[in-house]
Image: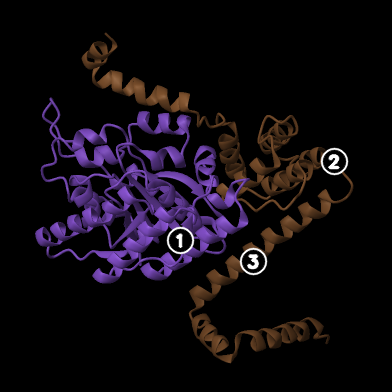
Amino acid sequence: MTQTISLINMKGGVGKSTLTVNLAWHFAAYSNWSKRVLVVDLDPQFNASQYLVGVHKYMNIINDNRPTIWEIFEQHTRTPAGKTQKITPAESVRSVARVRHGGKIDLIPSRLELSLSLRNPGQKEYLLQKTITKIKDNYDLILIDCAPTESVLTTAAYLASDFILVPVKPEYLSTIGLPLLVNSMRDFHEQYEEHNINLCGIVFNAVTYYSPEEMKSKNEVITLSKNNGWYYFRNEIPYSRSYPKGAREGQPIFRTSYARTEQALKFALFAEEFAGRIGI
Amino acid sequence: MNYNKEYELLKDLAKLLQKHGPESFKSLALLFSDKELAETISNILFEVHHHSELIKKTQKKLSKNKTLRSSIIELNKDDPERTNLLLSIYDKLEENKYLPTLKQIRLFCEDNALKPISARSRKSAINQFVKVMMELSSSDISSVKKLLDEKPEDRTLDGWSSIILNRKEDKMPNQTLKADK
């Protein structure tokens, strides 16, 4: 059964895109997972797209007349000629990697113009869910990399997802993104009662294990989680220079030349715990 | 009458019986009662056997102290197009025009569902890579060549800036002019 997970936090810079892409690589190519993974880039900053493809491929994507996530949201917008541009969901999917034994990574890319969709959000929140429903049988896992602001894109991500994964950087301002997110989920539940969405868990990202400030932030999040019954992952993701290095090379942490075995292993342990949480 | 072959088959079946258990054999026998299905499976098995024999032959010929280049020519003499494709890949690898590092050869194979490369030097990796190519159909070789011919990916800030800034100028020319003043 396909599981769709949105990676979301109302604070930017917590590592959502890096985590999304590394999870995609882990389940497609690491060890014996060989899963069919689709990454949906739902952020106008298109960081996940930049990580997964380089400049040339991205240029091809925006010039190949096939839909990106922007066209998915704008497919019913009337053009000056008065026509609508209904899209075929499968055409929006670009292949990134094919791994032996059936594992693969595909991408629905984003583009800057997605921010324009936010200006006219009317009736667009169901369009992502509709698109994903039509292609989900081709995948075991769908990861949606969300933008760090509350908008129609957030609602669209909630409607399309089975679970929400929340990366939190253990630092003061980043942790405040957590109650903001839970508030946003509550509002969503009130408005869309029929849609069931689960908080998969909170994962500490870019942990350095040094500063007392970091420990304080972590403890606050853990207490908040316990009081509210939210799951937090016991396996944390340590800070590593290999993550930005991997993003530059377009590679996951387990393929970077400088990845310390321990840090790559810690990511793998988190990924295994994550797999257990979502049942894949 | 000599039943050696049948005896060998029985011996193999006994081993498989031990490995898979009698239940699997019974359910397989039930499946084989459908004549059409049995025929299809037997055809598939024959094809697989034929293909693996071809691969074995290829590997055997390659190991006879010949250079890889001459082996490519000899093994594909009836198909000049295929020979050209393989030679072009081989030569460009040798000239460092394709996948100039061992790591790139390995990652290319991993990302395109090709047999993994275990070699520890680039030279042996090239040999291994070309041997993998020789097991593919001509159309698959040409798809791989298309991928190899793609420009090396640009991941620089400059490259991304030209995409981002050009697009912004396209969208909002007036604002850009005002900002420049």
Report how far apart the C-alphas of labels 2 and 1 lie in the structure.
52 Å
Secondary structure at badge 1 equals loop
The residue drawn where x is 53% and y is 56% is A29
Query: Chain under label 1?
Result: A
| Chain in purple in the render | A
Query: Chain under label 2?
Result: B
Q: Is the residue marked by circle 3 packed among few (<14), some (14-19), or many (20+) residues within 10 Å?
A: few
Q: Which numbered dot is residue A236?
A: 1
Find disc 3 in the rendering and name its residue.
Answer: B46
Give the amino acid type for the residue marked by disc 2 in the picture.
Thr
Query: Chain under label 3?
Result: B
Q: Nearer the viewer, mark 2 or mark 1?
A: 1
| Chain in brown in the render | B
Q: Report whether residue B17 is seen.
A: yes
Give the amino acid type for the residue marked by disc 3 in the picture.
Phe
Residue A24: horizontal and vertical position, in percent? 45, 53
Residue A159: horizontal and vertical position, in percent? 21, 56
Residue A260: horizontal and vertical position, in percent? 61, 53
User: What number of labels is visible?
Assistant: 3
Residue A202 figure quarter: bottom left
Q: Are marks 2 and 1 on the same chain?
A: no
Report how far apart the C-alphas of labels 3 and 1 lie in the structure.
51 Å
Give the amino acid type for the residue marked by disc 1 in the picture.
Glu
Q: Are marks 2 and 3 on the same chain?
A: yes
Q: Is residue B149 above or below residue A126?
A: above
Report the quarter where the C terminus of chain A lies: bottom left
Q: Is the residue marked by circle 2 packed among few (<14), some (14-19), or many (20+) residues within 10 Å?
A: few
Report how far apart the C-alphas of labels 2 and 3 lie in the structure.
32 Å
Residue A250: horizontal and vertical position, in percent? 51, 41
Find disc 2 in the rendering and name its residue.
Answer: B67
Q: Is residue A170 above or below residue B139?
A: below
User: Toward the viewer: B141 or B9?
Assistant: B141
